[in-house]
Amino acid sequence: MLHAETNLTSVPDYVLRPPAGFYRALNPATKLVIALCTAALAFVLRGWLAPILALVVVGATVARARLGRAFLPFVLATLPLLVSIVLINTFLYPGATDTLFVVGPFRATGSGLTVAGQASLRILAFALSVAVFALTTPTDDLLADLERRGLGRRASFVVGAAIQTIPRLAARAGEVADSQRARALDTQGSPWRRIRGIVPLAGPMISGALSEVEERTMALEARAFSAPARRATLRPMPDDQAQRVGRWLFGLATVVLIVATITGRLALP
Amino acid sequence: MIDVQGVSHVYPDGTRALDRVDLLIPDGDRLAIIGQNGSGKSTLVRHFNGLLRPTEGRVLLDGRPTADRRVAALAARVGLAFQDPDRQIFAGRVRTEVAFGPRNLGLRGAALETAVSGALASVGLVEQAERNPYDLGFSSRKLLALASVLAMGTPTVVFDEPTTGQDLRGAERIQAIVAELAAAGRTVIAISHDMRFVAESFARVVVMRAGRVILDGTPAEVFAEANWEELAGTYVEPPLAARIGARLGLGSTPTDGALIEALVGRSA
């Protein structure tokens, strides 16, 4: 079969990467709109309903995309923040008098606990909706699609580099730590020893990241990054009328809900 | 002495990098580890100083298992110079960078100064001692990384791809360092894809493929024509001298010296 955008008669599966399941097969822009709108609704709207609805959407997406255990680290990553939110609001909420119980000098209050619960749900819904998007959408697919929609080549590079920096830095951090531990840097000793290890660990990370930027820039220029020609993409991004309408409707509904809530025309429980 | 007993290592992503490796490295050995990329060489040497722990089996260093010892303690016995110097350089001066390892091992004052100066002299960077490491070229930074491990004075020194990026002069300097260390009775282990360097500088060659040791012997034994098919299986090409010697029917001549000697012997 002739590939519409590339004029290739056959494109191997490892290039086309046929997506598994309905959600993963959606256009990257559709998944981005779902994630951003869900996150915005969860974060901006007050009360219980919005974050609970957002979590329902996220839960349905997780099940639909069959994310399974891959999702757990994202849930666990939010725990420290959630615990601090619950503790601070429950025990230190300003002006609250409806005491539930007392722990030493601290009083847990009902209104503090309510605020903590709502804030926790908002954080959870916000973080997880973004996590679902990240887990189901390869960065290069998203960038290729955004570039096709008119995002500048340089802008797409900046976005892509920013997203890809995190895993690259993580890999580099492991190598740097191994190098310094091999020179007897004790990263498992006393707090003082650990503090002393910051410069030897951070130094190569930062200098390496900076020199990598320079090398990547030159490598891109060597491969005609600045050439004015329109680039062809190997992988087509599936998109259809239903998705286009869905994106606009979801986006508009989100804006309307947020504006209506902020202006006081809509009060959510 | 390093004693690798039935060691397997499986990375978290499920990759089995080592598969029941047995290897005994006596004190004072000059050992080169070769094999295709991904054959398990780097994973193996990272077990020598405890950076990696075996999934199965055990590694004994001087008779004691490495598994229950901290890397910082093992680093006093096994120095490991990594392939990429830029993964370790952080100091503003070459001298400070070299002093980092021995200082971590507790050296101070004159002892530290002697260790640093000796290591800088070994790699030929004495005149660059006060310069910023990042003002040096890649090959000099690589030598700096070697110096920073040499200065630790460990009984065992492991080099990961030491000749990569070196010109002839740099490669000869590294060969001299290996000879110096061996003459001092220290164990020298190197991972390399430079077969000439391997044949010229090491007394023993271990060949790895798919996480296993497939050949182990002297350069003359490992690079003998009978093993070429096995070597090709792990994308290793014998040194030029070995191939010329085999073509001329001179037997196994892995080094330039061995080839010349065989040629002289035949013409005499």
Image (tube, rainbow, N blue to C red):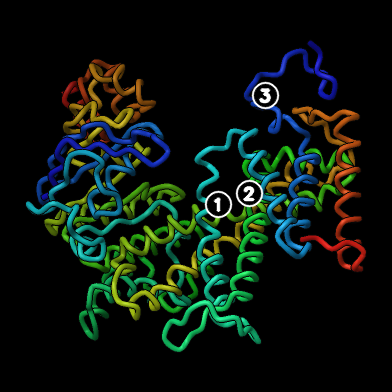
Find residue B5 and report its horizontal and vertical position in percent.
14, 39
> Looking at the picture, does residue A174 appear above or below residue B129?
above
Q: Nearer the viewer, mark 2 or mark 3?
A: 2
Find residue A111 and report its horizontal and vertical position in percent.
63, 75
Q: Left of A170 or right of it: where is B29?
A: left
Residue B38, picture quadrant: top left
Find residue A107 and report its horizontal and vertical position in percent.
51, 83
Q: CA distance from mark 1 to mark 3?
A: 25 Å
Q: Are marks 1 and 2 on the same chain?
A: yes
Q: For mark 2, what is the residue?
A: A131
Protein chain holding label 2 = A
Which residue shows up at 87% across the image and 67% down it? A262
Q: Left of B221 or right of it: where is A126?
A: right
Front in this rendered view, residue A45 or A75: A45
Which residue shows up at 37% across the image and 39% down it? B194
Protein chain holding label 1 = A
Image quarter in which the C terminus of chain B is found: top left
Q: Earlier in the sequence, mark 1 or mark 3?
A: 3
Which residue shows up at 55% across the image and 66% down it? A81
Q: CA distance from mark 1 to mark 2?
A: 7 Å
Tell whether label 2 touches label 1 (CB within 8 Å): yes
Front in this rendered view, residue B68 or A225: B68
Which residue shows up at 18% across the image and 38% down it? B204
Q: Are marks 2 and 3 on the same chain?
A: yes
Q: Are marks 1 and 3 on the same chain?
A: yes
Q: CA distance from mark 2 to mark 3?
A: 21 Å
User: Does residue A187 appear anywhere in the picture?
Assistant: yes
Say the numbered circle drawn on residue A74. Answer: 1
At label 3, the amino acid type is Pro
Q: For mark 3, what is the residue?
A: A18
Number of residues whose C-alpha sits closer than 10 Å to that of mark 1, classed few (under 14), some (14–19) or many (20 or more): some
The number of numbered discs placed on residues in the rendered structure image is 3
